[in-house]
Image (cartoon, rainbow, N blue to C red):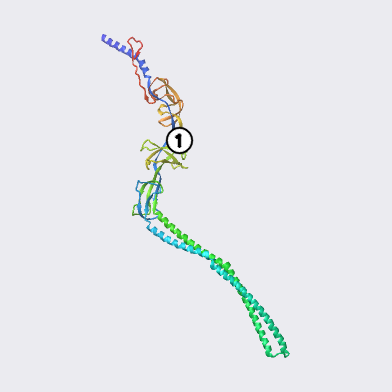
Amino acid sequence: MRLTAMVLCAAMLAGCGAKKDMPQMEEEAKVTSVEIANPTINTVKDEYMYSGTIQAAETVDVSAKVTGTVEAAYYEVGDTVAKGSVLYKIDDTDYQNSLKSAQASLNTANASVQSAKTSVDTANGAAMQTQLESSKNAITNAQTNLETSNKSLDDAKIALDKAQSDYDINKQLYDVGGISEDALTTYKNALDNANNAHTKAELGVKSAEDALNQAKTNYDILSNKTTAENTRKAQDGLNSALAAQKSAQVAVDNAKQQIAYCTVTSPISGTVLSKTATKGSMLSGVGYQIVDLSTVKVEVNASEQIATSVKAGDAVTIVIPSMSDEQFVGSITEIPPGANSDGTYTIKINIPNTTGELKAGIFAEVYFAKSTSNNAVILPRDAVIDSDDGSYVYIADGNTARKVAVTVGIDTGDTIEVTSGVTINDKVVVKGQTYLADGDEINVVSDNGVDIEITTEATTAPADGKEAKKK
C-alpha cells in the first residue's frame, strides 16, 4: 500500500509539471519561420499559348522552260544557294542551230529593207526628174510645132486667097476671050493646089494642137499621178520588207530566249530541298526545289478573343520546346477576315531565322499577349492569398506579420501583378504565409533569397521557480 501511494504521488507530481510547461510550448509554436522578398518592377503580359508547326516562309519549284538533256547540275540536297545561282544547264545545241537559221533569215530581211528604202528614196529621183524634163520638152516642142503649123496655115490662106483672086480675074478674061483655055486651066490648077495646101495646113494645125494637148496630159499624169504611184509602190515595198524584218527579228529573239532558258538559276536564296536534275537525263519538269529558311512561318488556329485583340505587325513570343527555353520573336503577318468552320482564326506569323536553327516541321508554341503592363509591381503568385473577402499578402513588420489587402492585375501563373497595397520597399512574405494570421510572430530565415543565420536561445527554469535565464 505504501509503495502504491508513492507511485500515485509521483504520477500526480509529473502531471502537475506537464501543465506548468504547456503555456511555454504553445507560445513557442506561434513563432513561424518565413522567407521574405521585395516586389520587383518588370513588364508582365496576359498571354495565351497556341501550338503550331514551323514551316518555310517560301518554297520554290525550279524548272527549265525548255525540254532537253541535262548538261550539268551544280548543287546537291542540303547545299546553300544564292539568288541567281546557276542550278543546272540544258544542252542548247538544237537551240543554237535554230538561232543561226533565224539570224540568216534576219540578214536577208535586213537587205530587203535596205533595198526597199533605196526604192523609196529613188521613186521620184533622177529617173523621174528626167522623165519630167522630157515631158516638159515634149510640151515645148508641141507648142513650137503648133506655132509653125499656124504660120503655115496663115501662109496657105494667103496663097489660097491670091490663087482665088488670080483665077477669078483670069476667068473673067477667058469669058470675054481675053485668054486661052489653057491659060485659065493653069490658074485653076494653081487654085486647086492652094486649096490643098490650105487644107493640109489646117490639118497640120489640128495635129499640132492635139500633140500639145497630149504632151500636157502626159506631163500632168507623170508629175501628179505617176509620182504618187511610184512613191506608194515603193513605200508598200518598204512596209512589206520591214514586216518581214520584224518577223525575222522575233525568230532570232525567241531563239536567243530558248538558249537563255537552257541555263536555270535559283529565283531565291535558300537551301536545296530536293533535286531531280542529273547530268545526261532528259528533263521537262522540276529540276530543283529550293526552300528559304531565312524567315520561317508558323500558323496557329486561335480563338475569336485573340483574333480580335491583335493585329498584323504585332510581335509575338515563340518557344520551341525541343530546342531550349530560348524565346524567339515573331511578327503577325495575316489575320483572316473570317473564321474557320470550327470558329477559330488561322493567324500567320513570320519568324526571323538568320542563323538557320529553326527547321521546317518542328513543333512551336506561340504566345499572344492579350494585354501588357509595363513597370508593374510583381510578386510570386504564391505570395498572394485569395479569399472570399479579396486578395491579401503578409508584410514583415519587424518580427510581426501584418496582413495587407492588395489589388491584383495580370496573373501569369508563376507571378502576379499587384496594382495597389504594396510597394517595392515592402518585405512581403513569399514562403510560410499559408500558416500565418495577422499579428503572428515570425522568424525570417531568408531575405530576397539570402539565408539569415538563426541564433538559438535555450531556456532553463531554476528549481526555485524564479524567472528563467536566457543563454
Question: Do we see residue 111 in this rendering?
Answer: yes
Percent of width and height locating residue 57: 41, 44
Q: Is residue 39 left or right of residue 155?
A: left
Percent of width and height locating residue 239: 50, 62
Question: Do we see residue 237 in this rendering?
Answer: no
Residue nearest the viewer, comparing 185 with 394: 185
The amino acid pointed to by label 1 is Lys
Percent of width and height locating residue 423: 45, 25
> What residue sits 72% from the left and 88% below the top?
173
Residue nearest the viewer, comparing 219 with 263: 219
Query: What secondary structure is found at the residue carrying circle 1?
Result: strand
Instruction: Pick the quarter of the image with the N terminus.
Output: top left
> What residue sits 38% from the left and 48% below the top?
289
Q: Name the residue beneath numbered marker 1.
A: 370
> What residue sits 66% from the left and 84% below the top?
192
Q: Is residue 40 depicted above or below 95 in this figure?
A: above
Displayed quadrant of residue 34 = top left
Instruction: Pick the quarter of the image with the C terminus.
Output: top left
Q: Is residue 169 depicted above or below 360 in this figure?
A: below
Displayed quadrant of residue 150 = bottom right
Percent of width and height locating residue 181: 69, 90
